[in-house]
Structures are given as structure tokens and as C-alpha cells.
Amino acid sequence: MADARVGRLASQHRDAAEPPPVSYGVLGRLLGFHLRRSQTAVAAHVMDRVNPEDAITPGLFGALEVIAANEGLAQSDLAKAMGVDRSSIVKAIDQLEARSLIQRLPSDRDRRRHRLCLTPAGRATCARLRERFLAQEAVFLQARLSAEEVETLMGLLERLHGAADPACLA
Amino acid sequence: MADARVGRLASQHRDAAEPPPVSYGVLGRLLGFHLRRSQTAVAAHVMDRVNPEDAITPGLFGALEVIAANEGLAQSDLAKAMGVDRSSIVKAIDQLEARSLIQRLPSDRDRRRHRLCLTPAGRATCARLRERFLAQEAVFLQARLSAEEVETLMGLLERLHGAADPACLA
DNA sequence: TGAAAACTGTTTCCTAGGCAAACAATTCTG
DNA sequence: CAGAATTGTTTGCCTAGGAAACAGTTTTCA
């Protein structure tokens, strides 16, 4: 029965060089699938065009940007904001510090903490990357969605993961 | 200047035990950020509740489901459908085969190819997992979005990554 | 005050997931 | 038939991240 259907479809495609289409089954109705595919598509697009000299990943840029927006914050706070473990943040900070984009400065109130601050070079790089990420996402999005649709999508996703930008709550 | 502002905000929060809020900077306007956070949120929710005995990841279930929907397809076709490298598929297939959920059967037309097919146990497990994934995603989504919003979100994401289900093109 | 609890950054170890290149077997192409 | 292309596989490498343990440093509270 299924074979008969496949047979018909296959014969329809025998002349055209198209391979018989593959069904995604129930994945088309699973949000997780669409989220993952979209996430990798956006990341791949942006990575391919932002990289030239900086060779930075979206994750590292995210950390850099959060530090830039909250200079002097501690690693634990950054971890909480990024939704990852404290120990995972250490590697990211190490990389950013190795590129001389940030510094771990001592806190005079709490000697356990490190105040994360950008270097002057870090500030410049962050500003440049910020523009590139925004521009390249715009290129990707404008080819697929209208401005209103992008706005709608952002709003829905924000409600989905619930990590709203506190700067918007002023 | 920035110090003065932080000082004011901090004093506003000194009595309440709330930590001073962290700003996400431009990340709030980057779709990649929202996509990643949403993806991990959904995956974590589903993983925590679907797992009991099967202990399967969303990725492995995705492969299983695509095989179920296209029995007899080759590993290369699966790789193309999942958007990953041929060599990455081998490990996934190995795991599914180790759990006796699928089999690599020889193709009589092309002795290079393996026809991927579910075992009877695989069919049962796949059907059960399918229901659980759908149900748990529904639980997650219903707490945050309306049915129309979910529909809108799915549609927008589908256009974003462009991997439409050919079964919908009938 | 002083002991116990909690927090911070770090290290080490482990896992999942994925790419690139090389390879043998097989099929396709001219 | 010879060369090009395809398929599955292996090996090696990389990124990202969690879990647990640790020492130094507050904080709590009896």
C-alpha cells in the first residue's frame, strides 16, 4: 500500500532528476525541530560573513556584549544571564581575555569576585561586531521575512524563553 | 557617569533582595540569541519529562522519526534531510541500531547503500516517543503562547530555515 | 565571637555533537 | 574499459557544556 504510493511518486520523478522527496514525519509539527534548524541557519549565515579577521563565535560575542552592557559584573552573574554553568563561563572569559578584549579586575568589596571589564580594544571590537551581527542578521532576515514578521517572531520567542532584557523594563 | 547611574539603581535595590538586573545589550535585538535560548528551553523541558526509560535525545528521535517516515532510505539521504554531514549520521545510526530500534538492510539495487528500516520494537518506541514529544511540547507551549501564536511561530520558523516537509506539498 | 553555611572562581574529567580528510567498495559516465 | 562520482566508514580534531571537587572568601546565626 505504502509501496504503491511510493511507486507512483517515484515514477513521476523518474524523468526529472529530482530525488524522491523525504518526509519529516511529525518533526514538522515539533517546535524544537524548527527552532534548531533556524538557529543553525542563522548562525551559519552570520558566522560566514562576520568572521573575516575576528573569527568570533556568536556565543563569545554574546558574552562580550553582556559584559559591555554591564561592566564590572561578576562571572557568576554572567553565567546566570547566559543560562550556563559557572564552569562553562571560565573558558569563554579565558578566550576573551586571551584576545585582550576584556580584563578580570579585582573587586575591593568582595575578594572572591572578578569585575569583568572591557579593554579599550575590547570596546572597539565589540562595537564593530555589534554592527556586523545586526547587519548580517538583517540581510538574512530581509530575504525571508517582512519587518513586521520579524518583530512578531522576536516577541513570540522572547515570551518562549522568558529572558527579557531588563533594560526594556525601565 | 555610568557609575552614578549604577549607584542609583543599586540603592533602589538595596532593601529588596533583588540583585541588580543585568542588561542583555543588543542581544535582545538579535534573533540568533532568542532562537538559541528558546531552543535550549524547549529541549530541556522535553528532555526532563520524556526520558524516564528511553533516555533518548531530541536529535536521535528526529533521526528515528525521519527513518520511520521514509523506510528504506539511505544514510546519505538522512544526512541531507537532517542537514548534517554523512559521517555524523553514522554515530546516530550506530546508537539506534545498538538499541535495536532500526536495522541497516542491504539494497539489492546498489550494494553501497544501506536501507534504513525500523524493527518492530523501533516502530513501537517511535510511536510512543512521538506522542510524548508532542504532548510535552504542548505542555511547554500552552503555558506561554496561544494556539494561534504557536501556529504563527511555526510558520515563520519554517520560512526561516526553508526545510519544508514535502508531505505538505501534495 | 566563632563555627557552620554559602558563595566564587577554578580545575579536572566526562559527554554529546559535529566537521574534515582519507579510504575501500561500488556504481556511473564517457 | 578507464576515470569520475557516490556511499558508508574510520580517524582525528574541535566546540560547547555539565558534574564534582577544591580553596579562598564572605555571610549567617547561635
Image (cartoon, coloured by chain):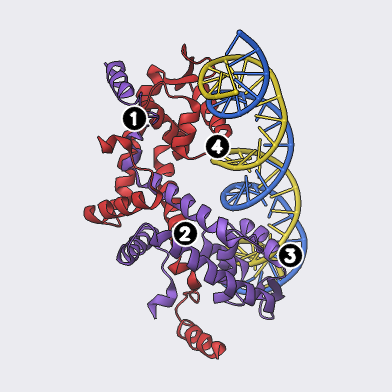
Chain colours: A red, B purple, C blue, D yellow
Q: Position of residue A110 (x, y in %)?
A: 50, 16
B96 with respect to B26 (left or right): right
Question: Mark 1 is on which residue type?
Answer: Arg
Q: Position of residue B113 (x, y in %)?
A: 66, 71
Q: Nearer the viewer, mark 3 or mark 2?
A: 2
The label on residue A32 is 2
Disc 1 marks which residue?
A: A128
B15 with respect to A28 (left or right): left
Q: Position of residue A146 (x, y in %)?
A: 24, 56
Question: Mark 3 is on which residue type?
Answer: Ala
- Give the chain letter at badge 1: A
Same chain assignment for discs 4 and 2? yes
Relative depth, front residue between C5 and B59: C5
Question: Mark 2 is on which residue type?
Answer: Gly
- Classed neighbour count for the residue bearing mark 2: other residues with Cα under 10 Å, few (<14), some (14–19), many (≥20): many
**Separation of marks 1 and 4 at Cα, in angstroms:** 28 Å
**Separation of marks 4 and 2 at Cα, in angstroms:** 22 Å
Q: Position of residue A35 (x, y in %)?
A: 43, 56
Relative depth, front residue between C2 and A50: C2
The label on residue A85 is 4
The label on residue A84 is none
- Give the chain letter at badge 2: A
Say which element carries label 1: helix
Q: Quadrant of residue B88?
A: bottom right
Q: Is residue A56 visible?
A: no
Say which element carries label 3: helix
Disc 3 marks which residue?
A: B98
